[in-house]
Amino acid sequence: MTTPEGARPHGSEALRLNRQVCFAMYSASRAATAAYRPMLEELGLTYPQYLAMLVLWEAEPRSVRELGEELGLDSGTLSPLLKRLEALGLVQRRRSAEDERRVEIFLTDAGAALSAKASGIPQRLADAAGLTPAELDQLRETLGRLASALQASH
Amino acid sequence: MTTPEGARPHGSEALRLNRQVCFAMYSASRAATAAYRPMLEELGLTYPQYLAMLVLWEAEPRSVRELGEELGLDSGTLSPLLKRLEALGLVQRRRSAEDERRVEIFLTDAGAALSAKASGIPQRLADAAGLTPAELDQLRETLGRLASALQASH
DNA sequence: CACAATTCAGTTGTGCACAATTGAATTGTG
DNA sequence: CACAATTCAATTGTGCACAACTGAATTGTG
């Protein structure tokens, strides 16, 4: 069904792409990011930037390390991302006084105000997902267990 | 529970990070890629390169467009990736004779032989996932529906 | 047949991810 | 207290993703 004219099939069953949960996850995750894109464009954010803002909207200020803990990202990813959020005027980075290694991320007024514009996004995406609330709950729970097990595996 | 000392909480419930299925998917997908990494290192492949090889192991040759269709990737991603696979000696790119726009991707002997070394990976990952086969099946099915709905949404 | 529209692969530019490293600040230990 | 070990953010380099564009080849239509 997936094999085009002229291509010789010789794959083993275990290696079939369509069998692989990880590929389904990889595809669905990219599809979700793509579904967010037009909504986030209205806010001028990328999806990872939106995630960082979500964390800050919950509580603020946060150090780069705390943000990384929440998002599972390291400073190699966060440093330039936060610099971009600062350039957008949404965030301010300030060296901590008590611990000069730390950099605290504060929301600017514009950054704090942006949450109002973002408040409808989760529901809009849930609608686009086409799953029942129960299915979404269960999916989130299963993915959480999966991520934990995978992280523990290496 | 996630709010550190000194950070002022003021998030709305809908925007809570831990509530969001998409973040769970994003995290789990990255965790899966990370779990693959040490296994794929033995093959000298990245995860997207491994996906391309999976498609070619199923049937070969494939045009760049066909590969892109299977993986949901465009030429902007695939062209350099395939160039790297060619540099690794796993693949050969050849202009199609019937349609000079197309570039056909052939496995080299080394590329074909690599599937033997990869054959254990899906099972190793399934073990690391810590889910039952039934849960994995259901997860894959749900993710498939989710990805379809999200793609249809824009 | 002519030529506009489409298909196809590649390139350029931006923004993640992530490994590896750096250098400064802090903590732990003898 | 001294100094080794650790923590923290930033930087560098590689490899995706993806939008926008280019140019060549093919297809569709008048």
Image (cartoon, coloured by chain):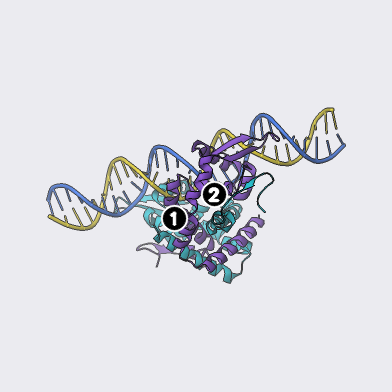
Chain colours: A purple, B cyan, C blue, D yellow
Q: Is A144 located above or below residue A100 in the figure?
A: below
- Residue C7 location, quadrant: bottom left
Q: Which residue is mark 2?
A: A51
Q: Is residue B138 visible?
A: yes
Question: Residue drawn 69% across and 46% down?
Answer: B5
Where residue A107 appears, x then y in whole percent? Answer: 56, 41
Whole-number angstrom distance, CA of label 1 to CA of label 2 = 15 Å
Question: Residue drawn 50% across and 41% down?
Answer: A110
Q: Is B27 located above or below residue A9 in the figure?
A: above
Q: Between residues B55 and A90, which one lies in front from this camera angle?
A: A90
**Image quadrant occupied by the N terminus of chain A:** bottom left
Where residue A151 appears, x then y in whole percent? Answer: 64, 55
Mark 1 chain? A
Mark 2 chain? A
Question: Residue drawn 64% across and 58% down?
Answer: A148
Give the residue type at disc 1.
Ala
- Label annotation for residue A6: none
Where residue A146 appears, x then y in whole percent? Answer: 61, 61
Q: Between residues A112 and B62, which one lies in front from this camera angle?
A: A112
Q: Which residue is mark 1?
A: A35
Mark 2: give few (<14), some (14-19) or many (20+) Cα within 10 Å.
Answer: some
Left or right: A117, with A76 as reference point:
left
Q: Between residues A79 and B63, which one lies in front from this camera angle?
A: A79
Furthest residue toward bottom: B134
Left or right: B89, with A144 as reference point:
left
Tell me the SS state at disc 2: helix
Give the residue type at disc 2.
Leu
Q: Is A142 located above or below residue B44 in the figure?
A: below
Where residue D10 appears, x then y in whole percent? Answer: 59, 34
Left or right: A144, with A132 as reference point:
right
**Image quadrant occupied by the C terminus of chain A:** bottom right
